[in-house]
Image (tube, rainbow, N blue to C red):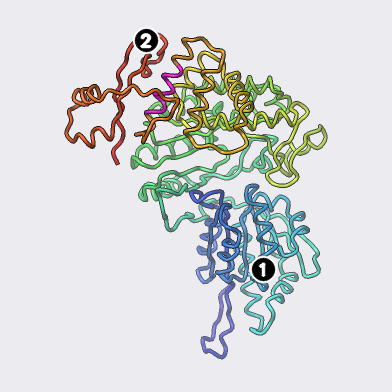
Amino acid sequence: MKSWKVDFSIESFKIVFMKILLVGINASYSHTNLAIRTISEYIKSKNNLSDVKIAEFTINQPYMELIRGIASFKADAVLFSTYIWNAELTSKIIMDLKSVLPQSLIGAGGPEYGLCAEEYLKKLNDLDFIISGEGEQTVFELLELCNSLSCSMDFGDNKNSLKHKLTGHIRNVKGVYFKDLAGNIFYTGDRPLICDLSEIPFPYPEITDPDNKMYYYESSRGCPYSCAYCMSSLDKRVRFMPLERVYADLQKFLDANVRIVKFVDRTYNLNPERYIKIWEYILSHHNKKTMFHFEIEAEYLSSDALDFLQKVPEGIMQFEIGVQSSNPETLKSVFRSPDVTKLAENVKRIPRTIHQHLDLIAGLPYEDMTSFGKSLDFVMSLKPDALQLGFLKILHGTEMEKMALHKGWKWMKTPAYEVFSTPYMSYENILYLKDMEVIVDAFWNSGKFIKTMGYAGRIINWWSLFCGLVDYGRKNGIFVVQHRETFWFEFLCDWIKSECISELDSAVMYNLLKYDFVIRGKQGGFPSWYCHNYDKEKHRNLLEQDGGVTNARLDFAYSEYEEFEFDPETEFPENNKGNFSKLIKYKRR
């Protein structure tokens, strides 16, 4: 860093350090923006004199509130962290921001603007520069340059002169697309990657709201795989944070009792010796609260890793596993491993104490509706805790973009670049799967229909089951508005009555639906579809058998009594017909 010789007399003091604001616009309040925190802490570690602030907002906030919040910092330079989910909103803000901050430089970075830099600089007149690639060193050097140029300016100069001076000096700062005063765009050249990740400080010097915030963390950068649809495939140079540093960082999360830490490593399980040691540290130091989330390539889990996972108790880890398709031809076409047999074997060996979130992507090559149905059945046979039914996004610079341009894919030309149709799926097919996404979220991912859907999935294959629910929903026009959770219970009850299934299956599913409904929590009243078989004396007797009635008001308030024709707590309720009295106890506040 340049050292300054300063005369601290009022007359001669001319050093004015740039005020820089790093802005993250997140998808929700619970999210944290890792990029702006990492850059901020990196700059502070190199130069404690710079005035660097971060500001986080959400895409759901009122627009004028966003403008006012950003403008309130009165920053000399405002930099936005951009992704496909916030790019359009960020563009709108940039178009308006110069009206309230006419003297400020406005820049951006991140995977969305960074990979389409010239396009965004041409489109947005008030956008001055874009950071391409890793931002820590680039933003630091850019700030240092601005500081030195500011010091050589008279206080009476118009701030635009800073941009004018930058045009002549910024070529020395690698990794920047810059637009000069005449609107000409030039690129300063690629910047080498940070090889030693330990140079990057821990991004959370203060951990606030640990119960409601998701804290993102990276222990590595880069990905060696070449998935055609993924931007991570553009850079295969993998770098790892030293293990001792990772341990120290994780301990900070554990000491703060953070609710969830999400590793953003593109593929966590690359090096068994390394990733198992991190798991071992987590397990041996766990605080009985923090959940750690990992993105896993399940087919590459080592035997030692699978053996270790058998020791992991519930509530410590959750896995996101990208299956994407079970069609080997599809997987080969997008450069993924076609070994779905190995993937299935490994997923089945992961213990149920680890929450498993499995992904499918609709719109991939060679995947028509029949093939996609087989992929969905394959994933559901693995009994995921959640199924993410996603849709292909044609991202700039990827191999998938080249394929899509030449072979007939249609997709959004603005973020999020999602497919409308493919050579294998029509627009109507995509819309049908959009409705199925709603059904899967409501009836499987919500976790509210475990008993009912578990039984339904045994008597009807999953693809046919979800198609039946979509068809019934379309017939009744349910996809045009959002619905409360209680609506879906009534909807499923109606479907059970109307579906051509046996009388036995219909009766079993109705009883299971009642059980799923009543175990959610104490009901203020029961809906019309629910036949409540209540006997207060039997309720009291079951409470007495369960440990006695110590406070009648509270004991009754935090429990429920119900009678069922089939035992809903057995694996095969259809084989257990009779009169089953159940006491359901709820957690007390």
Residue found at the very far bottom of the displayed protein: 11
Q: Is residue 485 above or below residue 11?
A: above
Q: Is residue 38 above or below residue 71?
A: above
For the N terminus, give its image quadrant: bottom right
- Front residue of this view, candidates 342 and 60: 60
* Residue at the disc numbered 2: 577
Element at badge 2?
Answer: strand
* Residue at the disc numbered 1: 105
Q: Which tag is nearer the camera, tag 2 or tag 1?
A: 2
- Front residue of this view, candidates 421 and 443: 443
Residue found at the very far right of the displayed protein: 406
Q: Where in the figure is residue 162, as x and y percent of width and height?
A: 69, 74
For marks 2 and 1, the one nearer the N-term is 1
Going 58% across and 61% down the picture, which residue do you hit?
Answer: 66
Q: Where in the figure is residue 297, as x and y percent of width and height?
A: 56, 31
Query: Label 2 crowding class (10 Å Cα cut-off): few <14, some 14-19, many 20+?
Result: few
Residue 517 in magenta? Answer: yes
Q: Is residue 183 above or below residue 318?
A: below
Q: Where in the figure is residue 64, as x and y percent of width and height?
A: 60, 62
| SS majority, magenta | helix
> Which segment is the magenta one?
509-518
- Please give left or right for residue 421 compared with residue 5 in the image: right
Element at badge 1?
Answer: strand
What's the amino acid at mark 2? Lys
What's the amino acid at mark 1? Leu
For the C terminus, give its image quadrant: top left
- Front residue of this view, candidates 501 and 226: 501
Query: Label 1 crowding class (10 Å Cα cut-off): few <14, some 14-19, many 20+?
Result: many
Going 55% across and 35% down the picture, which residue do you hit?
Answer: 270
Q: Where in the figure is residue 345, as x and y percent of width and height?
A: 52, 20
